[in-house]
Image (cartoon, coloured by chain):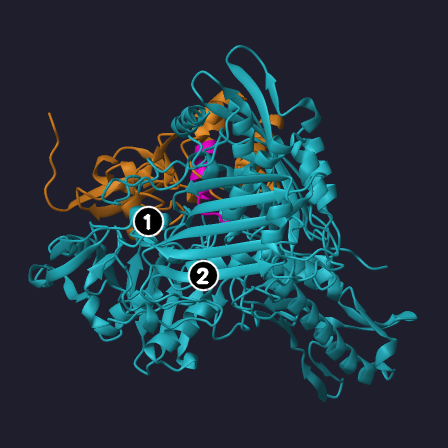
Amino acid sequence: MMITYKGNKEISLKINNEIYKVVVKPNETLLNILRDKLELTGPKAGCENGDCGACTVLINDKPFKSCMALAVEMEGNDITTIEGLKKTEIQKAFIDKEGYQCGYCTSGFIVNAYALLDKYKKPNEQQIKEWLNSNLCRCTGYEGIERAVNKVIDNR
Amino acid sequence: MTKSFVGKSIKRNDGLDKISGDQKYLDDLKFGGLLYASILSSPHAHAEILNIDIKEAENSPGVKRVLTGDYHPHAMGLYLGDKPPLAVQKVRYYGEPVAAVIAKSKADAEKAVQKIRVKYKKLNSVSSSRESLKKEAPILHQNLKNYNHIPDVVPQPNSNIANLTKIRKGNYQKAAKEAKYVIKEKFKFPPGDHVAMENRSAVAEIKANGDVQIYSTTQAPFVVKELLAFNFDIPTGKINVIAPPIGGGFGGKAGLQLEGLAYILSKSVGGKPVKIVNKREDDMVSSPGHIGLEANVTITADEQANITGMDLQYYFDAGAYADYAVNVSRAAAISATGPYRVDNLNCDSYCLYTNHPFATAYRGFGHIELAYVIERSIDILAKKIDIDPVKLRLINAISKGDTTPTRSLMDNNTGDLKACINKTAELINWDQGSVVKIDNDKVIARGMGLLWKSPAMPTNTDAGAILTFNNDGSVNLHNSIVEIGQGTKTALRQIVAEKLQMPLNKVHITSEVNTKTGPHDWATAASRSLMMAGRAAINASEDAIQQLKNTAARVLRCPVEDLTVAEQKVFMTDEPNIFIKVRDLCLGYVYENGNAIGGQIIGRGNYIARKLSSMDPKTGEGRPALEWTLGAQAVKIEFNLRNYSYEIKKAASTMDVGKVINPDLARGQVTGAMAMGLSFARSEGFSFNSSNLVQNDTLRDYKILRYGEHPNYYVEFIETPQGDGPFGARGLGEQGVIGMPGALANAISNAVNQEIKELPLIPELIYKNVKEGHNDD
């Protein structure tokens, strides 16, 4: 049966281990709510079409483009944004290996790479490629990002 | 002993902000009482606006105001003022802003904008730059003769020529007559987009006292401020433009973008703050993108493979408005030949109106475009002469003592291009062959492309730096370079730390640019930030050192010249144990009895481009170029002859950038640029239907390089010092894009043994070029 929503709805979202109560419209995306109502502006609206990955968050430890998720459907999930990652190996490696320049794609890339490195202890080149090609970076040419991911793997 | 910070791979100062999601870009900032705008854009490439019905939109919930072009029907711009903020009477490209709704929320504005009804009468459109020159082509700007423009731009009224820059050097006709070898080729590629990850946005507010405050995703806050003052007749000092760090620019955020529109929107609602944010589709087609080009190239050479002459016609596709593009076409003329010694040159560089989305600055500014056609032509010439293309490049590489197309002398600061060529050939294993068969289907192919670039800036381009101190002895560098990801702020900190001999963590730097509190600075563009702001930072440091010494000399009762500043102290050079700490001097020295002297130290520094001059309109003679960065690039690809697909395996660059201030950051600029140049050549560019509507205005259909498609990068630097650069440095931010398209197309041409003359290099296009090539035989 299709669930239908009408008008505003109050939902509670678990984000970065905190519970947020928030009123949403049925057509608002998770990205809209994170950025506009919860002041979690780490995820970026690069295309709002699922093409660039700048809005990537974790939903139950899996990377997900938050522009492609309706907020109203997110109750009961465990959501992690870049703000919920603190001094992780991949974040340190992004600094050490120049995995960023302008920084706009960085939140999404780090969240995606974090999930990859969480799922696989030592992902191979093909796995890294399959995961990270869902995010776009226009500054680095991806060399710094590749080196950052490899640094984490090499340290394991 | 002096400590060295310059030449070291110091980590960027913005790392922790950017990896934690803490960095705030414009769209992340909160503003009180904000109204939101939504823009209706043109569904046609060329049409007359017969009627706009805004009634229903005005009555839509939350709507404060609906504006159309007649609210401010005046053309504006930087180099050629040809574009009104909202279309007036006509639309000239698909995506052109036609009307704007201002409402209490983004959702209200977006809903209302769909209720605006526009009646259009479609007009014939111009679909290419060559077509724009035809007799039957509609004239897109009837009012061209009345537009404001800078003296260096030459529009031709009653035509679609927004600018024509001519170069006449030596005697090309004679060279052509005496030539042993001649090649004559035509090239073309479509316009495209920058695809900075952050879409453009602007917030404008007019305060009760008339002060105008603009927040913008701009690379050029001072240009914005001065253009708003000029176009809206506001005293410049009443305007403040604030530029937070931006999510990539690549030239697309220079000049005037959404700021003029934001200003009139705010004005129309009594000065309340109004925000416009581009959606990705708007950012790709409504806002300006990358210029397209069609070109004719004739090159002549003598028996010994010396290039004797070039005859070049560049037809740039500026799209519907040519404000910034006119200067791109001028830049392409200044550097028309690529980095080759060419004593006899005819070049006509046209900037042409078409009904495509309009073009602006793009990384490389005219050079990536001309380099593609020149580097392809050099390879074709090499085949004609039957000489190795790398050898042909070595024979003709420009060097010290030669002259540029505008007859400027390549002086003592000229980089060593031949060393760059040799190094790149080595990095790409050129000696293993330009085409090597792997199996029945696949070949390995290699291709090279050279690059050169000079910034095409106003002759009075400047930068400033101010140093203030904190009571812990640390220093603040106030500068007006916009943080666009390039890392210049880190390099500037290194320069100040080096000069003041102070630990890096004691050198703080402003991250946003504020045109009221920061020193004047032309723009963060043209790869000139480090060179110019670096010089200003050196001056400011020296000024601060002198002031510190002056106050210390009074306290220590010694001659000023006996003092040294280092390690946060001012000490007597020959007796270092006699010293005063900087923190006890920098806000004035206080004696034990309370008397204070000296006052705070404020270091000031400036820089202005030297000896630049305008070009002669008939011959192009002049000195428009501040400095030249030279380099050589190459790729190695694996090409599938069965289906024309390929992988870019290796990409190599050697550039002579003078002193490398920060090797890791320099490498990052070059690899990023190489990826952008390869991406542009491989798969980018707008695809138009027969009505000139863009078919690929999303990132799903407009293909930029993704993770895993990137090659292994090989990057080397040669460091011939730039005498007038800070510590001998010259520009390197854009240059890495320039040679890549030619290198990739040369490799593919080698692989398929046919001359590719178009872009983007998608399998279908390669196949088509190959088929047409065979038909010609």
Q: Colour of chain B?
A: cyan
B109 or B438, which is in the foreground?
Answer: B438
Chain coloured orange here: A
Residue B621 visible in the current orientation: yes
Report in which chain the residue with disc 1 lies: B
Query: In terms of secondary structure, what is the magenta stretch mainly?
Result: helix
B462 or B633, which is in the foreground?
Answer: B633
Q: Position of residue B1 (x, y in %)?
A: 86, 59
Q: Amino acid at mark 2?
A: Leu
Q: Position of residue B574 (x, y in %)?
A: 92, 71
Tag on residue B131?
Answer: 1
Q: Measuring 44% from the left and 25% from the top, which residue is drawn there?
A: B770
Q: Measuring 58% from the left and 49% from the top, which residue is drawn there?
A: B310
Residue B322 visible in the current orientation: no
Q: Quadrant of residue A150?
A: top right
Q: Amino acid at mark 1?
A: Glu
Asked whether, in this view, residue B306 is left or right of residue B756, the answer is right
Q: Position of residue B309 (x, y in %)?
A: 61, 49
**Residue for badge 2:** B164
> In the image, which residues are magenta?
A101-113
